[in-house]
Amino acid sequence: MDSAPAFETAPPAYLPETVRTAVKLLIVGHFAVGKTTFVGTLSEIRPLRTEELMTQAGAVVDDLAGVPDKTTTTVAMDFGRLTLSDRLVLYLFGTPGQSRFERLWQDLARGALGALVLVDTARLRQSFEVMDLLERHGLPYAVAVNRFETAPAFPDQEIREALDLLPETPLVTCDARDQASSTRALIALVDHLISLDQESA
Amino acid sequence: MNRPRGERALVRPHVVTGGRAHPSRNVFDLVTLVIAVGDRQAGLGPEQRRIVRLCQGGALSVVEIAGHLRLPVGVTRVLLSDLMDGGHVTTRAASTAQQPRLQLLQEVLDGLRARL
């Protein structure tokens, strides 16, 4: 026999037997915008991280340039879980916003209900790439400004203009460290998804 | 269904999968819920045994299995696919496609509101 499985942390928290449906939402944004914090704040399990191997083929590679013998890189995904009812579980995926992770995006976007874009007002421009990715994958989204104490406060209208948001795209403010605040940001997203669904019906 | 050949190089085949980079079936989404069927482990490789043991306690998603066992998701999918072919695991699926999207979204919304 092998030794006991090497669990990353504690033994796994299994889902209730009645749960039959799993859905996913993506938490996206540029580097260090607070995705991992957001997922960790809401997750009922200790957030796990998994890695996917990728080659640099077809990708705009930066960090591997000049390392000719390294043909693969890994990309980390943080994810968390919220059991929402006795039959439904929601998974949140913290997803890197660079288009060189397009392969990963295909996997994540498939079947995802939508995405919450976290933005930092000090670095609004860095959110363009991720918003392009969302639009390319046809994923509906809402935008949440993650409140950084050091970041400048702008009126909503200025943020909307800077990000070129559609009038119907929700823009909310949240504190990724706060559970209620982060939950409300997700609610704004799901409300929006419901409106979009009703419009298209 | 396998992915097109041109995509093959994107996940490095891992020794634990016997060099294969793609699963024999394509049922495993990141959030597909998996549970073990019984505890037969004869003939399985060490990584597959770890999966079967992990999944005996109850249902976990594919991505949780990968996270707990510290395996890349692609490798986990290949292993799960073989385990499913061998009848060692099954999916607890109600495909989300079977349910109207609006109804599903409403359930998500209700669940989130209940947490406030």
Image (cartoon, coloured by chain):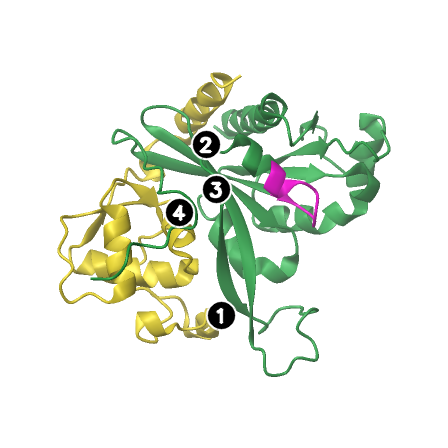
Chain colours: A green, B yellow
User: Residue A17, relative to residue B10: is it above or below?
Assistant: above
Q: Is residue B70 magenta?
A: no
- Amino acid at the residue labelled 3: Ala
Magenta residue check for A32: yes
Mark 1–mark 3 distance (CA, rounded to whole Å): 22 Å
Indicate the position of residue A164 as horizontal and vertical percent values. 77, 39
- Which three-letter amino acid code belongs to the residue tagged 2? Glu
**Which residue is pictured at 47% across the width and 74% down the height?**
B9
Q: Which residues are magenta?
A: A28-37
Label 2, residues with CA under 10 Å away: few <14, some 14-19, many ≥20: few
Label 4 chain ID:
B
Residue type at mark 4? Glu
Q: Look at 14% across and 51% down and name the residue there.
A: B39
In the structure shown, which secondary structural element does the residue marked by tag 2 occupy? loop
Read off the chain for label 3.
A
The residue that mark 3 highlights is: A112
Residues marked 3 and 2 touching at CB (< 8 Å): no
Q: Are marks 2 and 4 in contact (CB under 8 Å)?
A: no
Q: Nearer the viewer, mark 3 or mark 2?
A: 2
| CA–CA distance in space, label 4 to label 3 | 17 Å
- Name the residue that disc number 1 marks: B10
Q: Nearer the viewer, mark 1 or mark 2?
A: 2
Most foreground residue, B108 or A65? A65
The Cα atoms of the two marked residues, 1 and 4, are separated by 22 Å
Numbered tag placed on residue A44 in the rendering? 2
Query: Residue A102 at x, y = what percent?
Result: 58, 59
